[in-house]
Structures are given as structure tokens and as C-alpha cells.
Image: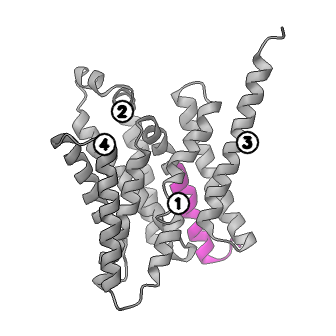
Amino acid sequence: MFTEAYMQRAIAAAIILGPVCALLGVFVTARRLSFFSDTIAHGALAGVAIGIWMGLTDLTLPMILFSLSVAVAMIWLKENTDLLTDSIMALLLSGSVALGILILSLVRGNRGELHSYLFGDLLAIEWKDVAIAAVLLLVVLFGLWRWLTPITLMTVNEDLAKVSSVNVRALNYAFVLLLTITVALSIRLLGIVLVTSLLVIPPAIARPLSLNLRHQIIISIIAGFLSCFGGTVLSWQLNVPCGATIVLTCVGLFVVALITSKFRQRSSQPYS
């Protein structure tokens, strides 16, 4: 298994993107942006459709660019209209998916790559994707190391962060940029349908087991790594889709974490 070139690429991408998604997911879930990331992921469908319509062989760039445009549109509408956040996200998600379906209906050529973007494909991972993911990991680690306190303060209370002289607007745009690129790259591994789960489930695993934010970050990163590595290996062993296997591994770890936390709570209760 480990001697196969495509598995080496897939495992390398998985063990990089898993922790990155899990790390960002701690702040995504804390800021209640899970639907935000889901909108970005589904917005990528229109980018994929545009790339296919243009006859491009590599669809990563149009996918990232269109996802970024969706993210920027969400922030702009939130700042310049009275629409509720969930309404904005639902509007852009449905509009992006509708646009993607419309463009795909007009394409007469081969649309075989669409399946790999919807559900993920191990063979779609290339070394350049692994290199980009590695650079992204370094950027995320540096960014959180450098601005962890203001990001945490902004996550807890944006108004308090503004009063504390934190450039909330710049941090929001930087966070959205990293989140969008991370989601777009992870689509190659998990697919549009399942990519958000890697942002949401590892923090959910860490939450009942952690005592503070530092513990939650560490446990979430470990959960993301174990889920992606274990799911990728299991998918090869069982000859089943990789994305679904990674997500089910995440869910299995969540069940274990939930049972462990409940058992620990009962053990810590004094006997009456």
C-alpha cells in the first residue's frame, strides 16, 4: 500500500489537511461558521462547472477563485445589508449550486471529473496539491501563533475585540481566505458533499474531552490526523470511497469521545 505513488500522495495530503481543517474548525465552530464553510464548499461546484465549461484540465484555480468570491460576497452582504447571516448563506449556497448545475447542463463534453469533486478521489491528489497543503499548514500555524490572542478575543466577542484595538475586519478577511483555500484543497480528498465534516467533527470530538482552548486545539488536531490517516488506510484496505471512510472514522472517534466523557463525569461524581 505505502509503495504505491497515488497512496503516498493521498496519505501525505490527508495527514496535512486533516490537522489543518481540525485546527481551523475549532474557531469555525466556536464562531458558529459551520454553515459558512458549507456554503463555501458548495460554492466550489460552480467553480468546477466553470472550469469544465472552459475546458481546463486543472480545476483547482477556478474552484478556489469562485469560492473566494462567494466568501467575499457573504462578508459584503453581512456588512452592507440588513439580511440575517443564515439568509445570506442560504441565498449564496442555493445560487451557487443552481449556477453550477445550469453551466453543467450546457456542457457537452466529458464531465467525468465532476464525480471526483463531489465525492472525493484519491487519484485526484497530486504532489503539487500536497505542496500547496504543506505551505497552507505552515501559514495557518504561523498565523495562529502570531495572532492567537486577538483571534481568540474576536471569537469570544467581536465588540470587545474592537474596543481592545484589534483589527477585526482584517482578521475576518484573513481567516476567511485561509478557510476558503483549506476547504477548496480538501475537496480533492473528501469531495464537496463531505468536506465540511472535517471542520466540524474533530472540534466536536475535542470539546467534551478538553478543559480549555489549548486542550481543545491539541485534541482536535490529533482527531483530525487520526481520522484522515486511519480513514485513508481503511479505504484502501476495504476498497471503499476514501471521503466517506474518513468521515465515518471521525464519527466513530466522536462516539468514543462522547462515551469517554460521560464515563469520566460519572466517575468524578461523589457517591451519595
Q: Earlier in the sequence, mark 3 or mark 2?
A: 2
Q: Nearer the viewer, mark 4 or mark 1?
A: 4
Instruction: Indicate the quadrant containing the N terminus: top left, top right, bottom left or bottom right.
Output: bottom right
Q: Earlier in the sequence, mark 3 or mark 4?
A: 4
Q: Which residues are magenta?
A: 1-19
Q: Which residue is mark 1?
A: 194
**Location of residue 107 in the rendering, given as x and y in whole percent from the top left corner:** 33, 86
Magenta residues: mostly which secondary structure? helix
Query: Which residue is depicted at the point 23% across and 53% down?
Result: 73
Residue 268 position (above or below residue 256): above
Q: Which residue is mark 4?
A: 85
**Res 207 → quadrant:** top right
Q: Are marks 2 and 1 in contact (CB under 8 Å)?
A: no
Q: Are marks 2 and 4 in contact (CB under 8 Å)?
A: no
Secondary element under disc 4, as helix, strand or loop, is: helix
Q: Is residue 246 left or right of residue 35?
A: right
What mark, if any, has residue 256 been given in the picture?
A: 3
Residue 82 position (above or below residue 129): above
Name the residue at the bottom extreme.
109
**Location of residue 200 in the rendering, given as x and y in whole percent from the top left corner:** 52, 46
Look at label 4 and name its amino acid: Thr
**Location of residue 55 in the rendering, given as x and y in whole percent from the top left corner:** 31, 86
Q: Earlier in the sequence, mark 2 or mark 1?
A: 2
Secondary element under disc 3, as helix, strand or loop, is: helix
Q: Nearer the viewer, mark 3 or mark 4?
A: 4
Look at label 3 and name its amino acid: Val
